[in-house]
Image (tube, rainbow, N blue to C red):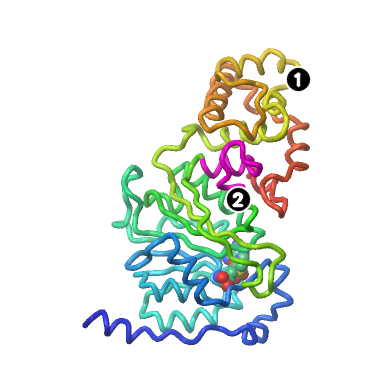
């Protein structure tokens, strides 16, 4: 009975129509800000239900815009939802949802790239890292221009068990350009295998849930969109500091199609390369003539550990960053189509 009463009381206002959006927010102007709205209720609902059961859970949604996914999260019974939106023009539309939400929706106008979620959820939801994930979800149809920098930032937070991950292995459902999701999930030997694959897969189980055609968005982007689900691993494949793993993986993949020894060489000043590179491969027990996209996680892990041992013995090597490697990384553009290489380095 209480359930029925709850349902009857939740009367969300009708979806924002495309013409309302054009009138309210001047879509031509926001296109530059990578604002592509999903106005199809079924697809919004599928993003929410595809990988998490939000009923009675606590959710944080990134970039709600006019609130179509927000509405689905509320309709699917989330106990509490906080949204983080950078553009204050969406406040009136989100306020209407808040009023209808029976106290379940909080709105934050802010930038998700600097937003700290350490105190966002009730402390009793926290779970030890090794336990099953807590009843907390992060969901977002992200703007393309921040999606990759954000996931890299969050992978670092996962590695340090900070930000939302002070609550345990919080799961995420996020959208990216389809091509970016394909790279994130690419296994060794796959044509899309790159450093983004290794970084994501090192700290998370990543799944490509489904694809949304570009035409489902207003305004229509030039590419299709992939919905990805992330569950942090109990233990990463490479249990070493984020910055060390990031550096070794960046160097290995700076020559993706060439022998991996070419990339590994860029970890060292020229004068000691002939000495250090064979040493690193011998210690790691990896064939230096493999191509970087062929390397498995255990092989990359052994290379990272070998590098870690070398810099422990020779700390000055740790600060070395080859110019060649930087130039290569910029040309390679293997992170995303928006060229967020610099952001990725953090
Ligand atoms: N969720 C809506 C939907 O699916 O229709 C809007 C998605 S739109 C692709 C991305 C949203 O993220 C926009 O509303 C944009 O203003 C917001 N946004 C962009 N950068 C942001 C940031 N750094 N922090 C929080 N929100 C941001």
- Span colored in magenta: 181-201
Q: Which residue is mark 2?
A: 182
User: At x 50% / y 51%, what residue is drawn?
Assistant: 207
Q: Is residue 338 left or right of residue 8?
A: right
* Relative vertical location of residue 107 with respect to residue 296 in this rendering, above or below: below
User: At x 60% / y 57%, what residue is drawn?
Assistant: 147
Query: In the image, residue 141 lies at what x, y percent?
Result: 56, 65
* Image quarter in which the C terminus is found: top right
Q: How busy is the neighbourhood of tag 1: few (under 14 within 10 Å), some, or many (20 plus)? A: few
Query: In the image, residue 93 lies at what x, y percent?
Result: 54, 82
Q: Which residue is mark 1?
A: 270
Q: Judging from the image, what secondary structure is the residue with disc 1 in?
A: helix
Which callout, 2 or 1, points to the residue nearer the camera?
Answer: 2
Q: How busy is the neighbourhood of tag 2: few (under 14 within 10 Å), some, or many (20 plus)? A: many
- Whether residues under marks 2 and 1 lie with C-beta atoms below 8 angstroms apart, the answer is no
* Image quarter in which the N terminus is found: bottom left
The image quarter in which residue 36 lies: bottom right
Query: In the image, residue 7 lies at what x, y percent?
Result: 32, 82
Question: Which quadrant of the figure shows ligand 1?
Answer: bottom right
- Residue 182 lies in the magenta stretch: yes
């Amino acid at each position: 009975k209480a359930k029925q009463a709850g349902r009857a009381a939740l009367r969300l206002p009708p979806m924002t129509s495309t013409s309302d959006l054009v009138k309210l927010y001047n879509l031509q102007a926001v296109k530059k800000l990578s604002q592509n709205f999903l106005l199809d209720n079924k697809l919004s609902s599928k993003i929410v239900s595809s990988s998490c059961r939000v009923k009675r859970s606590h959710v944080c949604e990134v970039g709600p815009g006019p609130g179509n996914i927000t509405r689905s999260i509320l309709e699917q019974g989330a106990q509490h939802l906080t949204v983080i939106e950078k553009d204050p023009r969406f406040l009136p539309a989100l306020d209407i949802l808040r009023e209808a939400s029976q106290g379940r929706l909080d709105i934050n106008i802010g930038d998700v790239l600097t937003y700290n979620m350490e105190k966002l959820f009730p402390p009793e939801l926290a779970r030890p890292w090794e336990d099953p994930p807590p009843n907390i979800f992060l969901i977002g149809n992200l703007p393309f221009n921040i999606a990759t920098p954000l996931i890299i930032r969050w992978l670092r937070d996962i590695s340090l068990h900070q930000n939302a991950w002070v609550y345990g292995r919080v799961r995420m459902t996020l959208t990216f350009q389809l091509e970016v999701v394909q790279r994130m999930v690419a296994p060794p030997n796959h044509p899309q295998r790159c450093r983004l694959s290794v970084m994501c897969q090192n700290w998370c189980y990543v799944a490509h849930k489904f694809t949304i055609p570009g035409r489902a968005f207003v305004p229509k982007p030039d590419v299709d969109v992939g919905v990805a689900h992330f569950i942090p691993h109990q233990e990463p494949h490479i249990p070493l500091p984020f910055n060390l793993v990031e550096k070794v993986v960046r160097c290995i993949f700076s020559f993706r199609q060439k022998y991996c020894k070419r990339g590994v060489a860029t970890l060292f000043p020229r004068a000691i390369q002939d000495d250090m590179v064979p040493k690193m491969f011998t210690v790691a027990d990896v064939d230096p003539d493999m191509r970087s996209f062929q390397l498995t996680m255990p092989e990359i892990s052994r290379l990272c550990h070998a590098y870690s041992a070398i810099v422990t013995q020779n700390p000055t090597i740790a600060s070395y960053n080859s110019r060649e490697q930087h130039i290569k990384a910029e040309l390679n553009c293997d992170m995303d189509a928006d060229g967020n290489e610099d952001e990725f380095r953090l």
